[in-house]
Image (tube, helix red, strand yellow):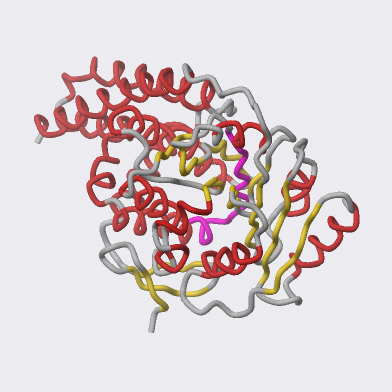
């Protein structure tokens, strides 16, 4: 058993070293200078009052960019997010913005349904799809538009810096997102290139979305962001990890809410990318080295080595790449918690999303639980 744990620890330390190399490879890429401004349609699906919603949306109204529009979609006019949008539209009359009433979704993924409604009336061919819990600086659109001056780029996925709420559970989750999750993306990018998209903000050409079958092809997938990038890469389109890091405000959550959210995350990840999910065990060196130490105490020098490499990886990925602040006491705690959720992800096929129960299928698609 100790030899098994030793092998896992060695694999984990190798992964941590690769994450450092992947981070520096990412940092070595300089964003291109903007030559001409590409008109942009910004799509924002909304549902309810997320924590800090008005502050999040305001940052998109304040873009320092020549030609863009913002399209919002809510299910019905009674959604409290609609009042926030109307207030901001009145405050920024020079910004071309519009609120759509999408109606009841025709399938399980309500976000994709809203996106499908918005893209039908979008005026431009460069599409930015951004969640309601994101926040950006005024130069955001300038940076991503410059990246699309390369005609080979079809999809760009924005890395994100997780900003927690006030609860311990929110802070632990943000720690994991800013270290383990981003490290996995950087390693995958270095070893095989970006063959997927992730996260709260994705930029794509309209013709690429149409080429892969449009939103109709994504509607049955819970991780529609991941498969959008996968389908685009499979079709020969360039997928990149953008040089622009957005803020992802995950809000305050109690234990029950955090459990439901993270179970949804791990269960959907296991079905979207099974091999990658198995490999996530290597992103958590501290639980593995602890198991090694408990079964063979004389391997204690490896514990010190693992701790040092883990600190280096977390520092480079979170601080240098994402420019996030880390509470170092939370890093080992999050490693233990994440390890538990990783194991839990192998069991169960139901999730709770915005108060509704869904059943996951083996290929990553999902449906309403009967």
Q: Looking at the image, which is closer to me, 289 or 199?
A: 199
Q: Is residue 54 left or right of residue 285?
A: right
Q: Position of residue 252 (x, y in %)?
A: 63, 51
Residue that lies at the very extreme toward the bottom in this rendered image: 370
Give the residue at x 40% y 63%: 213
Q: Quadrant of residue 289?
A: top left
The quadrant in which the N terminus is found is top left
- Magenta span has 251? yes
Taking depth in this image into account, of 96 and 302 the one nearest to the observer is 96
Tell me: residue 342, above or below residue 20.
below
Residue 3 x, y percent position in the rendering: 9, 29
Q: Residue at x 67, y 32 (%)?
A: 36
Question: Taking 360 as reference, is 237 above or below it?
Answer: above
Q: Residue at x 54, y 23 (%)?
A: 319
Left or right position of 328 against 249: left
User: Does 59 appear above or below 290?
Assistant: below
- Image quadrant of residue 324? top right
Range of magenta residues = 245-258
Report the label total: 0
- The residue under the point 44% across, 54% down is 262
> Residue 323: which quarter of the image?
top right
Viewed as shown, does residue 228 lie left or right of 53? Answer: left
**Residue 5 percent across, percent down from the top left:** 16, 33
Front residue (pair 40, 261): 40
Magenta stretch: residue 72 in it? Answer: no
In the rendering, at what x and y percent does residue 175 appear? 50, 36
Looking at the rendered image, the quarter that the C terminus falls into is bottom left
């Amino acid at each position: 058993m100790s030899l098994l744990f030793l092998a896992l620890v060695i694999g984990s330390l190798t992964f941590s070293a690769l994450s450092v190399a992947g981070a520096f490879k990412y940092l070595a890429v300089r964003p291109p200078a903007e030559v001409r401004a590409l008109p942009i349609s910004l799509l924002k699906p909304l549902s309810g009052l997320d924590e800090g919603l008005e502050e999040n949306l305001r940052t998109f109204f304040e873009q320092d960019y020549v030609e863009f529009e913002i399209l919002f979609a809510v299910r019905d006019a009674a959604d409290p997010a609609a009042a926030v949008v109307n207030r901001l539209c009145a405050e920024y009359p020079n910004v071309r913005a519009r609120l759509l009433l999408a109606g009841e979704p025709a399938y399980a993924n309500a976000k994709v349904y809203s996106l499908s409604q918005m893209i039908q009336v979008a005026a431009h061919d460069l599409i930015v799809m951004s969640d309601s819990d994101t926040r950006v600086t005024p130069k955001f659109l300038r940076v991503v538009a410059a990246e699309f001056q390369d005609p080979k780029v079809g999809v760009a996925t924005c890395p994100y810096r997780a900003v927690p709420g006030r609860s311990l559970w929110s802070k632990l989750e943000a720690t994991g997102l800013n270290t383990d999750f981003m490290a996995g993306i950087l390693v995958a990018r270095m070893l095989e290139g970006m063959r997927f998209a992730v996260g709260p903000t994705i930029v794509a050409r309209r013709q690429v979305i149409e080429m892969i079958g449009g939103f109709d092809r994504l509607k049955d997938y819970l991780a529609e962001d991941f498969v959008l990038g996968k389908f685009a890469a499979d079709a020969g389109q360039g997928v990149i990890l953008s040089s622009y890091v957005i803020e992802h405000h995950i809000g305050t959550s109690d234990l029950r809410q955090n459990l439901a959210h993270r179970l949804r995350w791990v269960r959907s990840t296991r079905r979207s990318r099974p091999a990658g999910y198995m490999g996530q065990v290597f992103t958590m060196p501290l639980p593995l080295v602890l198991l090694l130490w408990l079964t063979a105490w004389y391997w204690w020098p490896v514990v010190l080595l693992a701790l040092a490499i883990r600190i280096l990886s977390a520092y480079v990925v979170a601080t240098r790449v994402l420019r996030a602040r880390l509470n170092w006491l939370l890093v080992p705690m999050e490693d233990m918690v994440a390890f538990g959720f990783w194991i839990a992800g192998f069991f169960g096929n139901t999730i709770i999303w915005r108060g509704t129960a869904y059943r996951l299928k083996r290929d990553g698609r999902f449906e309403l639980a009967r």
